[in-house]
Image (tube, helix red, strand yellow):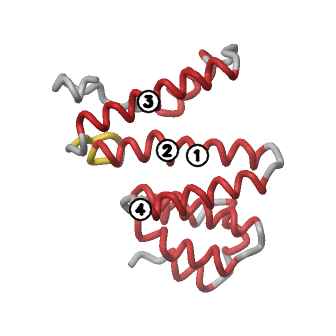
Amino acid sequence: MQLRDADPITPPPQDIDAFNASKLTQGAGVPLAAAAARSDQALGTLIDMWKAMGDRPFAWYVARMTGEALIRNSYAHPRIHLAEHFIERADKVRGYRIYEESAAELRKAEAPGHILGPALYNLACGRVSQGQFDEALLLLEEALPMRADIRANAQEDPDLAALKDDPRFQALLRDR
């Protein structure tokens, strides 16, 4: 509402992990039905805000426009956590399907590289776990140029450890 009303914008939390941890604690006792209703209401509010405002400059983490911020923070980022939730609870098929759907939808939406890149990277990690190394390397080849931070993290990412000795992977990690 601050942006719509031309008020100064409250900046995003500096320590997002601490912020998320506090929100998880606050929501621990909330019944699923109540959380789902609150999520539906919040999504409706975001859609209404988007309809009223359109795309305009708005810096929020890596986003530079309101549309980018909405796609990243309200679609792409939460889906990463949903996929991780299923993968950590041994439902890898469902988690990897979320990665696949997210990458496909972000491609369809023509999301900018700083949003699409992490989705492709996560899908590549899933492909490594599935033993689909060639597809993982193709996804990484596309994703790594989109965000310097994911290129830097790829070298030490345990999800990519099976590729560590592959010369194609090593070539992807070199600065271009």
Q: Earlier in the sequence, mark 4 or mark 2?
A: 2
Separation (CA) of disc 2 from disc 1: 6 Å
Residue at point 58% right, 46% down? 79
Q: Which mark is residue 79?
A: 1
Residue at point 27% right, 46% down? 65
Residue type at the position of mark 1: Arg
Q: Residue most toward the left?
A: 6
Separation (CA) of disc 3 from disc 4: 30 Å
Q: Are marks 2 and 1 in contact (CB under 8 Å)?
A: yes
Callout 4 crowding tier (Cα within 10 Å): few <14, some 14–19, many ≥20: some
Secondary structure state at the residue bearing disc 4: loop
Q: Quadrant of the N terminus?
A: top left
Separation (CA) of disc 4 from disc 2: 18 Å
Q: Which mark is residue 75?
A: 2
Residue type at the position of mark 3: Gly
Q: Which mark is residue 147?
A: 4
Quarter of the image for residue 97 reads: bottom right
Secondary structure state at the residue bearing disc 1: helix
Q: Are marks 3 and 1 in contact (CB under 8 Å)?
A: no
* Closer to viewer: mark 3 or mark 2: 3
Residue 90: x and y, percent?
83, 48
Callout 3 crowding tier (Cα within 10 Å): few <14, some 14–19, many ≥20: few
Callout 2 crowding tier (Cα within 10 Å): few <14, some 14–19, many ≥20: some
Q: Which mark is residue 44?
A: 3
Q: Earlier in the sequence, mark 3 or mark 4?
A: 3
Q: Which mark is residue 12?
A: none
Q: Earlier in the sequence, mark 4 or mark 1?
A: 1
Separation (CA) of disc 4 from disc 1: 19 Å
Q: Residue most toward the right?
A: 90
* Closer to viewer: mark 3 or mark 1: 3
Q: Is residue 54 left or right of residue 101?
A: left
